[in-house]
Image: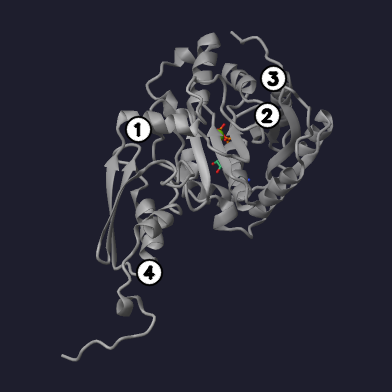
Amino acid sequence: MAAPQAVPWSGYAHRVEPRREDVLGALERVIDPELGRPVTELDMVREVRIEGADVFVTIALTVAGCPLRSSFENQVRDTVGGLPGVGSVSLAFDVMSPEERQALTTKLRGGVTERTKGISLDASTRVLAVASGKGGVGKSTLTANLATAFARLGHRTGILDADVYGHSIPHLLGIHQRPVLVDRMIVPPVREDLNLKLMSIGFFLDGNEPVMWRGPMLHRALEQFLSDVHWGELDTLLVDMPPGTGDVAISLGQLLPRAEALVVTTPQALAQEVAARAALMARKTNMRVIGVVENMSGDVFGSGGGAALAADLDVPLLGTVPLDARLREQGDAGHPLVVAEPTAPAALAIVEIAEQIAATRREQGVGIVKQLPVVA
Ligand SMILES: Nc1ncnc2c1ncn2[C@@H]1O[C@H](COP(=O)(O)OP(=O)(O)OP(=O)(O)O)[C@@H](O)[C@H]1O
Ligand SMILES: [Mg+2]
């Protein structure tokens, strides 16, 4: 057999052994998709072993059965596998101990071990509550598509599905993993391709008695839930509100700091009346109504209701989204229309609404939250 020819500059010819510090450096580019930080920073790298050209890495996951293994596998293969001299990369998983999880929680909370009341968000996070007076007007569809549009504008975006009666956002986005519980911190699942984080109150509702969804007990439970969710750094959080002006909507209104509300209506007059009630509720809970969206405009329902409501409320009509069956079809398939069919008129209308909202930054000092008494 002929001797292999030496090829100048090739890793093979020089037999460069991968260096430990290079492997660790590469692992700094492996990001935990849910926590949004490098695995090195999260103390998740349990072992790095180098045998000749073969690199063995072990990562400790927060919980066993973490649904994101393949994301870690792809990232480690791409980063470590690209280093000079690396022949093969093997990735093994381990699970953090309760102590490690607790240390991680403390780290993520910035050293604050005491649980704080209310939703944990940066002061710079914009909270947009999508509200309506009645059900079925397209709130969830708009929330999912607007969030996708914001993410595509480069905002770090999360969705809180707070519609205790429907919680349809997981379905609309095809996010089926459950949130991960790290110590007492709830980590929202992400949809990586859309770069969206999702928390649904439905995850938390399971097994809870409906009686809880009333009065002060509800308020405390919601407060607890919201304070346990770890959103990380977010630019925009969209909240799919429960329809109407019930206890849950009012409690949420009080617990979401500095929220701005978007009121969704259909073109008919009755829908406007109920939407006006939702707007009133938003104002009562110190949300600032930033505009109206008319959904399902077109021949069947006519149009103009959104403009009338916007005039009534003295806020802008941010857009009209036409009736388009593809919104429902793509939603049912877990693909927001704004990515599935970005040139559809309904998708364009939604993206334009997101751009308009993104262009308006909340003025400083408007709508400072005044704590209202708990509604019983
Ligand atoms: N512009 C539109 N054109 C066609 N269908 C739409 C449009 N907007 C929403 N839909 C469809 O209307 C139905 C209701 O929409 P959606 O679930 O988003 O409303 P909702 O206000 O969140 O309702 P609920 O009160 O039940 O939570 C869904 O089947 C959805 O796909
Ligand atoms: Mg809904």
Mark nearest the camera among 4 and 1 is 4
Dots 2, 4 in contact, CB < 8 A: no
Residue 299 visible somewhere in the drawing: no
Q: CA distance from mark 2 to mark 4?
A: 50 Å
Relative horizontal placement of residue 325, taking residue 33 as reference (left or right): right
The numbered mark at residue 84 is 4
**What amino acid is at disc 3?**
Thr
Q: Quadrant location of ligand 2?
A: top right
> What residue lies at 33% left-to-right and 28% top-to-bottom?
99
Which residue is outermost to the bottom?
2
The numbered mark at residue 259 is 2
- Bin the neighbour count of mark 3 within 10 Å (Cα to Cα): few under 14, some 14-19, many 20 and up: many
**Which residue carries the number 1 mark?**
100
Q: CA distance from mark 3 to mark 1?
A: 40 Å
Above or below, 156 against 107 in this view is below
Q: Earlier in the sequence, mark 3 or mark 4?
A: 4
Q: Earlier in the sequence, mark 3 or mark 2?
A: 2
**Which residue carries the number 3 mark?**
285
- Bin the neighbour count of mark 4 within 10 Å (Cα to Cα): few under 14, some 14-19, many 20 and up: some
Mark nearest the camera among 1 and 2 is 1
Mark nearest the camera among 3 and 1 is 1
